[in-house]
Amino acid sequence: MIRLTSVMAVAAACFMPFTAAQAQQLTVYTALESDLLPIYKASFEAANPGITIQWVRDSTGVITAKLLAERDNPRADVVLGTAATSLLMLKSEGMLEPFAPVGVENLDPRFVDQDEPPYWVGTNAWAAALCVNTVEMEKAGVAIPTSWADLIKPEYTGMIVMPNPASSGTGFLDVSSWLQMMGEEEGWAFMDALHKNIATYTHSGSKPCTMAASGEHPIGVSFEFRAVRLLNEGAPLAIVIPSEGIGWDMEASAIIAGTPNLEAAEALLNWSVSDEAMAIYAQNYAILANEALEVQIPDLPADLRSRLIENDFEWAANNRTAILEEWQSRFDGKSEPKN
Amino acid sequence: MVDISSGMDGLAAPPAVRPKSGRDDRIMLAFVIMIGLYLIVALALPLGMMLWKSTEVRSFSFAAVEAEVDTGAGFVALGTLEASAARLGLSDEVAQARRGPSLTAAQMFPRGNFEGEPVVGARLRIVGDMLGGSLEIGGKKFAQDEWAEVDSTGLRRLVIRAGTITSFANFKEYFGNPALTQSITNSFVVSLVTTLITVFLAFGFAYSLHRTCMRFKGFFQTIATVPILVPSLLAGLSLVYLFGNQGLAKGLLFGGSIYGFWGIVLGCVFFTFPHAMLIISTALRISDARLYEAARVLQASPTRTFFTVTLPGARYGLISAAFVVFTLTITEFGVPKVVGGSFNVLALDIYKQVVGQQNFAMGAVVSVILLIPAVFAFAVDRYVTARQVALLSARAVPYSPAPDRLYDISAFFFCCIVTAFLLTILLVSQYASLIKFWPYNTELTLRHFSFQGVDGGGWASYFNSLELSLLVAVIGTAVVFVGAYLVEKGRGFGWARGALQFLAMMPMAIPGMVLGLSYIFFFNNASNPLGFIYGTMTILVVSTITHFYTVSHLTAMTALKAMDREFESVSASLKQPMTRMFSRISMPICSPTLLDIASYFFVNAMTTVSAVVFLYAPGTTLAAVAALNMDDAGQIQGAAAMCMLIFYTNLFARLVHAGLTRALIGSQAWRKR
Amino acid sequence: MAGHYLEIRNVTKRFDKFTALLNVSLDVEEGEFVCFLGPSGCGKTTLLRAIAGLDIQTEGTIHQAGKDISPLPPEERDFGIVFQSYALFPNLTVRRNIAFGLENRKMNRAEIDSRVTELLELVGLPDKGNSYPAQISGGQQQRVALARALAPKPGLILLDEPLSALDAKVRLHLRHELKTLQSQLGVTMIMVTHDQDEALSLADRIVVMNVGVVEQVGTPEDIYDRPATRFVADFIGAMNFIPGAMLRADAVSIGGIELACPANGHADGAKVTVAIRPEDVVIAGDGAALGGNSFDVNVGSVEFLGPFARAQLVNDAFKSSPLVAQVPYTTVRSMGIEAGRTLRISLPQERLRIFDREAAHG
């Protein structure tokens, strides 16, 4: 019944066109997973009555490009949960407003911008993972890969999907981590070999995992959160953390300089590092900026934190454009649209 | 007998009469100007702006910036960036700006080094014309001759921003990039093959409906229009479910892949089929029975009759259908988006440039290229349609087919196959949206219809779409009908009415995405006083009405043309204001047409992606776009559910339309003889 | 200038390059029934529409009842109009159609109702008030259209080919009714028609038009008996045209035959066209005496037309264009007129019309 009335209320609201919003609206650009948005929104709005969040969600690359394109006429108030490498770029563009949220001192310094006050703060990390469809692997009679190196074996030809790094934050952290782990020359050589096994490059970082889950392409280079989610939905997946170590980035947030809603924006950043928010992140993410509040995620290895590579975000941010250019010139042909 | 004098009196030519405008004339002129302005603002100006922007190129102005670097021994002058480009690793000004619209000192001194030595400090100053660009540190702009100085840690914050120049460099870049130009060939080939297949199927289908005595014609006709009610990308989703790697009928491809050329062709055949079928039906319906009698008298064989009478009689319909299908396919992006794989087409390139890379100028370039075939096809279609109308009015005797068992049964089977194809596509999406976890758990569930935790905005998007469609149906019908009325029934201001007619025909030649992109340029512009509609429901209403303006306008024109030309004269002679004439006579007579137009607007506003995909904002996400975004994120079952929701809504709208039309005609006693 | 109900002065109408009316002037008296007659494209409808204000003239003035209406839009003029297509509003009943022009003008419902009833009686359709236009015949529809035009009691009724869409019998009947109605109401009517019978039988005066100019204005008898131009002579009824040359002010020669003719303005020796209507050719019996202007002809052929016959009469003097005579069939029978016979005929002086030869091709 409640459902029905709320639906009707929404419907009624819809039929009154062009009405101005009552509450203060905060336009938040985000690359967070869309299943999390309603939860975050509810928690924040409950704690800050009078402010409502208006999400603009897209993949990391698109959000970054959009913010850059709107640089002279910004429409976002806050950028929430977007890769630190992207925020570093925005910072150098002078697009961010420095702000130290309440409780920033409780966070791992790696998760906080080095300037004082910081231009951005990270809240939790997300890390690369392989989603492997156990049913399809069995059908095909091939072994489940355990390392990055396994992926270039010929038996996986046409079975692997990975996100396009130009549009997907996950894709970019994969590429940048390979380049950092293997060195530039060897890294590109690895990707050349991998390219032969790739069925398609997707626009979003989640899609390789959903494709693996539905058996469309049995191996998806994705990230741990999506893998856990799909596993819980009943997908026949194995989550593989490649043995060489995994790339990672954090969900970082910042205020867009010049926002007319500065106070509300600060409230959102305060909320994002609050214990309450951390508790919500902990339900889905194993690694938090506030390590003290971390909770073990059952389907992930307990030592996930130690599998993370030493990620040089500054290097990644500085070289993002060049890396993407190189990548596009090598591999763009197999991309799914919207890259 | 004093009164005859032709050309005799009057020494000089009498002064010209300046007709006094009556109240009606002023009202009409006001409306002509209003609707004309609407079309100028919603169509002509944005397109002009887009064409102009396609020649706008970002560029640095290296000669206008002077650099000095400190590697520990104080600042050393490097001269202008132009002079020191090689030492700083800079490419040419346009190429550099293409890589990124801002250039940081960190890029000039990779890893904080200059010629192998660590940089302690660097400074830049403007000494010339920056082409509209600027020099900044952390967002603070520097004036001419003012040094912008940073130490080694601030290299990334010292930024030069590119200005713009006008040139054809964008086009040069486009044609110099084989990955992009490949799309031109791809688009043409896909469109040609789709056109051939669709026109063949549509002709066979329409022929069966109008030239045979097969059974269940009503059923076939109804099913044939189903694709109009769903977003085109539904076809893509169903094809994945049918022929993807886990597809229900994967075996039929014999190891081939649905992703790519054939996926796009099949999907486009699905959604273009009804358009072609309806056009060819019209052509076949009006063919002249007398020609068939003549053929029989001359004892021509059925084959000969087919090739000498049937085909030529329907040739304008066939040509028109072919160009309509071609245009729809070449401007389509929903289907290639879902099943295109790595097979790029022009419409997708626009999307990729605009959404993926936010490279609006290159989007504009591709738009210009896409406009060429679209405008050409439009021109041909208009020419052919005009000829068809002439045929229609000249012919009289309708043809009624005679039963022929073999013939009718073959027609029946042909229609069964086509209908099965259409229904399969629809039902597969329906099935996929109802099962728990494709393909491993086929228990039935409604959970995909909850749209919880998926992209695209879920039910809110659906209600936005509903709102959009209702607004478009109501406002669009009013605007279009009044506009058509003024063009057809207005008096005076011939030039203004001619201009209005021209503007009303234009949208048909403009692909939806091109229109949407032109709106970004025009409305998302700080200096445009109408910019406030950007990001609101209003801009979606405007773009959708404009995108579907022409067909509605033509429908209204046809209805108005069928009305006596002298009604307005009579009404004026009876001293009745034009507004009363309009509300008491023209509107009631055209009311079924008004319903048709409203229904057309509604259905298309529900399904359109192309006209709105660049324009929706967080508060105005739409159902069809949501389906697209869900597919993007891999939530294909959610996407299928959303498409089915749109289908049921449109089906309901169609039923309401049919019911209203019936009730209306029933209540209008004058329509009965 | 004063005194005429409608005064049209030097009216010219151009559509782009095409001139539809050139310098037309015309007066219409109150209560008159005037027909604009001419072939299609002659400008008669254009003139009517200029009077109505539907297509306002490019130059020239139109005064109605002393008021200059030239620049006024139709709704500010005083006229009712009936079209060939009737233009009845299909979604209104006959009563509502007639009442349409009465509403919105300070008349109450009862007044409107009684006026509509009165008009229905007037046009003889008292029981069709609640029918829709599609439910009544064409002739009835045209009567309704007329009633609708008459309803607001305009000073002028304009009729644009009102009878052309009807079949012959209904047309004749309605023509008669229209005439009765007009004289009964005394309303000024202007009717456009291309049908000369209609014009001749209905009009008080006929305005014959051709290629945008007025050729002649006059009563039907004037127009028929004394056509002012060769065009009028040719357009109205049948006419023989024989080339000739003036001998004197009142004598003309056709191929050597001298004929006395009405005095006219042509100079001696001028090349002219001599015109006479077929029914004015007088045929005498063998050797019988005739008036002047008589000469012998051979009968070329005889075409039987019921009560009349049309005989082609040949003479060396006018070889290129045989003379046609219309002869009562009784005469044909009594005199035994047949091909090959020689007859003596007379062309009565007062029935001859002399036209310019050059202008003859206009």
Image: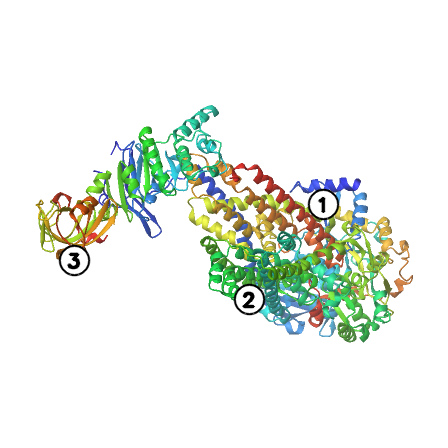
Do callouts 1 and 2 point to residues on the same chain? no
* Chain ID, mark 1: A
- Residue type (three-letter) at the residue carrying disc 1: Gln
- Residue type (three-letter) at the residue carrying disc 2: Phe
Q: Is residue B246 or residue C285 the one in the foreground? A: C285
Is there any visible trace of residue C9 in the rendered image? yes
Q: CA distance from mark 3 to mark 1?
A: 102 Å
Is the residue under label 1 in contact with that under label 3 (CB below 8 Å)? no
Within 10 Å of disc 1 (Cα), the crowding (few <14, some 14-19, many 20+) is some
Q: Which residue is mark 3?
A: C319
Decide if residue C156 is on the left or right side of residue C284.
right
Q: CA distance from mark 1 to mark 2?
A: 42 Å
Q: Which residue is mark 2?
A: B168
Q: Is residue A248 or residue B233 the one in the foreground? A: B233
Q: Look at the picture and state if C130 lies above or below A281.
A: above
Q: Which residue is mark 1?
A: A25
Decide if residue C188 is on the left or right side of residue A228.
left
Residue C218, x across and y down, in percent? 23, 39
